[in-house]
Image (tube, grey):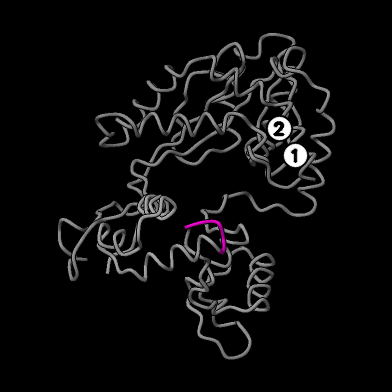
Amino acid sequence: MARLSREDRQIALGRLQAGQSQSAIARHFHVSQSTISRLWVRFQATGSVADLPRAGRPRATTAAHVRFIRLRHLRNRFLSASSSVQALPGPHRLSDQTVRNRLHEAGLRARRPHRGAVLTRRHRQNRVQWGNQHLRWTVRNHWRHVWFSDESYFLLQRHDGRRRVYRRVNERYAPNCVDEAPVHGGGGVMVWGAINTAGRSTLVHVQGRITAQRYVEEILRPHALPLLADQDAIFQQDNARPHTARLTTQFLTDHHVQVLPWPSMSPDMNPIEHLWDELDRRVRRREEAPANHRDLLQALQEEWDTIPQQDIRHLIQSMPRRCRAVVAAQGSHTPY
């Protein structure tokens, strides 16, 4: 026998209140007379024609189970649902999905983790100290004079492991279902660049292993020094070995280059890191993907030159917020 919809219940109720018989209403809606009778009794008892709350299937988890699952995953965020099923004390018949449901109710959902540098206690202390030292720096008086520099390695082909294929059973090794990729991404190219609120450097191709001697002769002397001709200019570089070598520091001192002290393990403080991500996305969005290292380098250089300067200024203008964020995080990872 069909059930009455909410609209039909309202109509049936109106007819009952108008004095129409229950049998006539039942024939009109093609339901049993007992259905109309129960509807009238429910309305008189509750003042509503909505369904009464039902008990439903009893929960397989007790309050103790829920507390155990929630605390276990709060203490170790990388645990799997299946591990919690196996770790639950006492006899139970819980599934992995039940554990996920309880975690969802607690506001915990599985997400891709943020990849951050390994930070020791000393790293965190240095980052907080650096953030406090530069809290009062403003874009107008300080950050606009800084040239942020860095090297970055771009792969010819990159796979993030999230690509999916729709296939039938036993089609795993079918030619049209296999995602072919060169080993180690097919290699790539390393480039160096520097940015400032007023401009940017050329994108320099760094071939082979970079040493302090090569860093000075192939990057600093021909590309960085012309950018730092202004007496107010400040040069930023991270703490890679070629950057902190005695040869490099002596070269910068001899040419009266003011260097911004930089805390170790702090890529999130350098706005150029976001520019590398944008550069990579621009190359990936090209209609014709680079086929070899030469094409990749050419694409990187072309896209580097077309990034709007306003985007670079916007990144550098975030430096005061980055300093506040690292202090608030007590030297730990920041949203940047």
Badge 1 density bin: few <14, some 14–19, many ≥20, Cα 10 Å: many
Residue that appears at 61% across and 29% down: 271
Q: Residue furthest left?
A: 175
* Quarter of the figure that contains the N terminus: bottom left
Residue that appears at 67% across and 34% down: 269
Q: Which mark is residue 326?
A: 1
Q: Which mark is residue 183?
A: none
Q: Quadrant of residue 27?
A: bottom left
At mark 1, the secondary structure is helix
Amino acid tagged 1: Val
Q: Is residue 309 above or below residue 131?
A: above
Look at the image and give the residue range highlighted in magenta. Answer: 45-49
Instruction: Please state the horizontal and vertical placement of residue 86, each as a whole percent of the image.
Output: 55, 83
Q: Quadrant of residue 321?
A: top right
Q: Which mark is residue 322?
A: 2
Counting labels gives 2
Q: CA–CA distance between discs 1 and 2?
A: 6 Å
* Residues at marks 1 and 2 touching, judged by CB atoms closer than 8 Å: yes
Instruction: Please state the horizontal and vertical placement of residue 318, each as a whole percent of the image.
Output: 66, 25
Q: Is residue 2 above or below residue 311?
A: below
At mark 2, the secondary structure is helix
Instruction: Please state the horizontal and vertical placement of residue 307, each as a whole percent of the image.
Output: 46, 19
In this picture, residue 184 sits left or right of residue 249: left
